[in-house]
């Protein structure tokens, strides 16, 4: 995100050394490639900066020192991602999938850039607390015991504790609430309806959708249409507005652009193509 600076006099310049990026603001989209550059000062709205498929190297110049702040922010991100990756490569990939689905859903819902920014961070780290859950529970193929369920139910609390020092109370609360359900049957606190932050409700749908469409030790994956239809049949659990936004992505085919190279089961024919 490129966000309005507290000091309006700050000027910033970005040169693309390698790779390509896309800048998005309202309905405007600009694609930039290697050796392109842009500058900005005193912007009045957030601009979304997206790196495309390949890694991107940028030269960033600013008229006032910000390196220490940026370095600390990036270090905090790297530290949390490392915690997830050390525990379970699947969990890291799942978190990335959930972030992509959640952001795509929020755009269909025409959420503000502020919500999208909070959503991206909280979705990426919603399961970081699983680093405290024993491997034998996380990867158990059979049914969990009541005691094992208690351990699983604590992971949103652990996630909140890990996220809050780096990203603040609001992001931490979104992470905490991603397993709450519309009828109050979720955890850890059993809140319901609009008591659950919108971002958490979006993550809940994206989280379940990815779990349903990805091979896991305890389930056989569904295709995208099967998964979204099942979610539509659970309005007591999931915000129906969020699920309908997801359905638009599935029905239009946009979901395939969102998932990119992620491994999802689409149909028997597509599975054969994927093997080749």
Image (cartoon, rainbow, N blue to C red):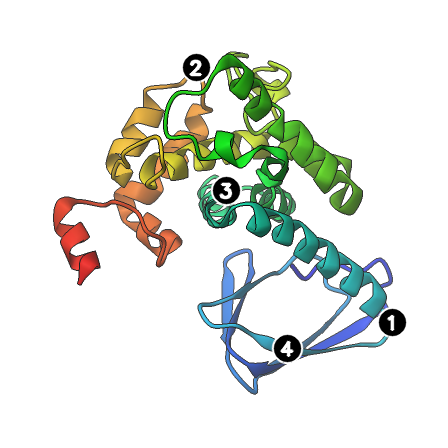
Look at mark 4 in the image and give the residue it sits on: 58
Look at mark 3 in the image and give the residue it sits on: 106
Separation of disc 2 and disc 4 at Cα? 46 Å
Separation of disc 3 and disc 4 at Cα? 28 Å
* Horizontal and vertical percent position of residue 205: 45, 32
* Horizontal and vertical percent position of residue 27: 50, 58
The residue drawn where x is 65% and y is 46% is 114
Mark toward the start of the polypeptide (1 vs 3) = 1
Within-10-Å neighbours for mark 3: few <14, some 14–19, many 20+? many
Q: Residue furthest left?
A: 269
Residue 187 appears left or right of 104 = right
Mark toward the start of the polypeptide (2 vs 4) = 4
Separation of disc 3 and disc 2 at Cα? 20 Å
Mark toward the start of the polypeptide (1 vs 2) = 1
The residue drawn where x is 28% and y is 49% is 253
Q: Is residue 174 visible?
A: no
Residue 213 in which image quadrant:
top left
Within-10-Å neighbours for mark 4: few <14, some 14–19, many 20+? some
Q: Secondary structure at mark 1?
A: loop
Separation of disc 1 and disc 2 at Cα? 50 Å
Question: Where, quadrant-wise, is the C terminus in this rendering?
Answer: bottom left
> Decide: marks 3, 4 in contact (CB < 8 A)?
no
Residue 239 appears left or right of 165 = left
Look at mark 1 in the image and give the residue it sits on: 65
* Horizontal and vertical percent position of residue 236: 43, 14
Look at mark 2 in the image and give the residue it sits on: 236
């Amino acid at each position: 995100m490129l966000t309005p600076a507290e000091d309006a006099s700050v000027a910033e310049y970005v040169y693309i050394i390698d790779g390509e990026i896309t800048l998005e603001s309202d309905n405007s989209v600009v694609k930039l490639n290697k050796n392109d550059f842009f500058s900005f000062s005193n912007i009045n709205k957030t601009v979304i900066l997206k790196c495309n498929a390949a890694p991107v190297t940028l030269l960033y110049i600013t008229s006032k020192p910000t390196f220490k702040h940026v370095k600390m922010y990036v270090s905090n991100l790297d530290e949390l991602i490392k915690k997830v990756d050390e525990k379970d490569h699947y969990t890291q990939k799942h978190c990335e999938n959930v972030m992509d689905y959640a952001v795509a859903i929020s755009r269909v819902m025409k959420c503000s850039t502020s919500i999208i920014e909070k959503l991206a961070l909280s979705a990426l780290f919603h399961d970081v607390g699983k680093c405290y859950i024993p491997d034998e529970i996380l990867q158990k193929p059979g049914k969990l015991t009541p005691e094992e369920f208690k351990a699983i139910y604590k992971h949103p609390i652990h996630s909140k504790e890990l996220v809050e020092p780096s990203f603040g109370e609001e992001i931490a609360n979104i992470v905490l609430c991603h397993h709450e359900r519309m009828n109050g049957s979720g955890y850890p606190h059993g809140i319901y309806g609009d008591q659950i932050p919108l971002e958490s409700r979006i993550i809940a749908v994206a989280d379940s959708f990815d779990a349903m469409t990805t091979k896991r030790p305890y389930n056989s994956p569904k295709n995208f249409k099967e998964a979204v239809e099942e979610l539509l049949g659970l309005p007591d659990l999931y915000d129906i507005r969020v699920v309908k936004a997801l359905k638009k992505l599935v029905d239009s085919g946009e979901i395939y652009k969102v998932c990119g190279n992620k491994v999802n089961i689409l149909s028997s024919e597509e599975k054969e193509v994927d093997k080749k």
